[in-house]
Structures are given as C-alpha cells and as structure tokens.
Amino acid sequence: MLGSAGLVGAGLVSGTGAAAPLKGTLKHSVARWTFPKLSIAQLCETVKGIGFAAIDLVGPQDWLTLKAHGVFSSMCNGAELGLDKGFAATQFHDQLVERYTRHIDLVADAGYRNLICFSGNRNGMDPEEGLVNAEAGLKRILGHAEKRGVMLVMELLNSKVDHPDYLCDRSGWGVALCERLGSDHFGLLYDIYHMQIMEGDVIATIRKHHAFFRHYHTAGVPGRHEIGEDQELNYPAICRAIRDTGFDGYVAQEFMPTAADPIASLREAVRLCDI
C-alpha cells in the first residue's frame, strides 16, 4: 500500500505543508464515498493530516481500519436496503427491522453512536401515510436503539435533482416524524446541499429546527462540488449558525471534488467550516 509520500506522488494527497490547527468549535468529518480513489486506510491518513479524525458512511467491514488509525466512524451505514426502500413502505419493515436490530448491536459494540436510515420513495404514497408507516416501522427498533445508546438518523435528500420520488425531501416532513416518535435517539441528517435545492432558507431552518438535526452534510449548489466561491451557499455563515445552536455533533463534507488536487479541496472546505 502507498505510504504518505507515495500518495503525494500519485496526486492523491496534497503535498502542501501542515496547516494551522483547527479551532475545534465544530467537529469535522468527510463522507467516505466522495474519495473513491483512496483506500480507507489512505483516507484515514489524509484526514489526520488535515487535522480531524472522523469519516462518514463507513460500515463494519472498515471499522477495524478506522480504529487502527485513530479515526472515528461519525455516521455508520450498512443496515439500509437502499435509499429507495425505506421505512415509509410497510413491505420493507420486516427486513429493515431484522437488519437494523443486528446493526444497532454492531454499532454499539464498536463504540459508535450514529446509524443512518432512509424514508425510501413515495411510489404514489400520500406523505401523511408515509409518516404513519415510518413511525410504525421505526418504533419496532427504536426501543433497542435507546437501550444500546444508538442514534437513528434519517437523511433529508432532494427529490428534484438527485433522488426522484424520495419521500423525506423536506425538513418539515422529517421534523413531523421526529415529533411523532418523541425519542432522543431519533433525529435528522440535515443535508445542506439537498435542502438548499428543495426549500432554501438554510440558516433560518437550522435556527428553528436545530433540536432535531443530529448531523450535517455539505456540498456546493449547484453541482454537488466544492463549497467555495463558485457556488451559491455561504458555508462560513451557515457553520456559524450551526455553532451558535450549541451543536456538538459532526459536520461532514460530502462534495464531489473537481479540482486537480482533491485533498486540497477537502482541506479548504474544512477551513471554510472551521469557524
């Protein structure tokens, strides 16, 4: 496997010098899938070199590697059936309950906390029916999650550009589900990119509903690329709003790099969010 020098030579890790330490007012992470050219071990080396120590959307097969590098799994995955087959559809409940019950134990035994879940698609369903169905399905596993100290986190995704027909595509629907469930062990992954596309008002929404937002994802709009000046969102202002709510979870970069040096893009994104 390539070491750090080999990664620089291969153009996978920026060779620029060490940056100033991060401020630590927000905890930073990065989605594993956005750096497919790096092995999980190489990505661990990369994030540690930038100055943070967490990776999102990592399953049990890679947790030992994360632990060996002192990197935390900030959002676990692997229990889901897919983005389109979720808790809003009763025909998937038995499978999901079996998979999530097992995965909750894996997450807890590994010392992690967050486990992602999805609503799935509408498939002609009324949103209110989807709420009723999702509440019923999630209640079958929520008690076990509470017992094991695991947080179930449903992601808000856009249905306009990337995930047609996805049901949990607006913060209001997700908040309503949180209120129905009434558990400290269920919340939302507020994806800033997705919600900017669907509804805008990002800072106002964070201020209003932050109690239900357990995790945040970033990316530039439009395009889901770097979060700097060539897109419409003001990430320093957004991250100040997140900080001011007292948030103590993770803000994870989930953009698809387009620059020649993708690690420099990640370093700059973390700098922008390090308010």
Image (cartoon, rainbow, N blue to C red):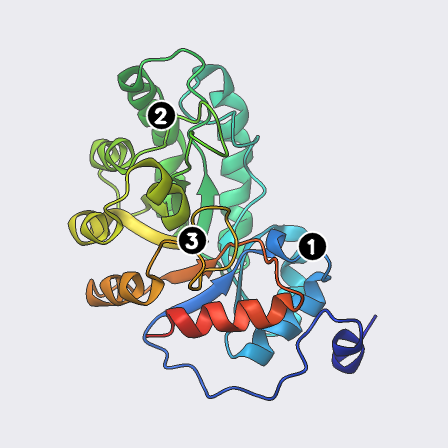
Viewer-closest of 2 and 178: 2
Q: Which residue is mark 1?
A: 36
Say which amino acid is labelled 3: His
Secondary structure beneath dot 2 equals helix
Viewer-closest of 169 and 84: 169
The quarter of the image holding the N terminus is bottom right
* Horizontal side of residue 180 vs 139, given as left or right: left
Q: Which residue is mark 2?
A: 134
Can residue 71 be seen in the rendering of this structure? no
At x 48%, y 25%, the residue is 164
* Horizontal side of residue 243 vs 86, given as left or right: left
The quarter of the image holding the C terminus is bottom left
Q: Which residue is mark 3?
A: 217
Whole-percent x and y of residue 55?
54, 62
Residue furthest to the front: 230
Whole-percent x and y of residue 259?
62, 63
Viewer-closest of 143 and 218: 218
Disc with the residue nearer the chain's start (1 vs 3): 1
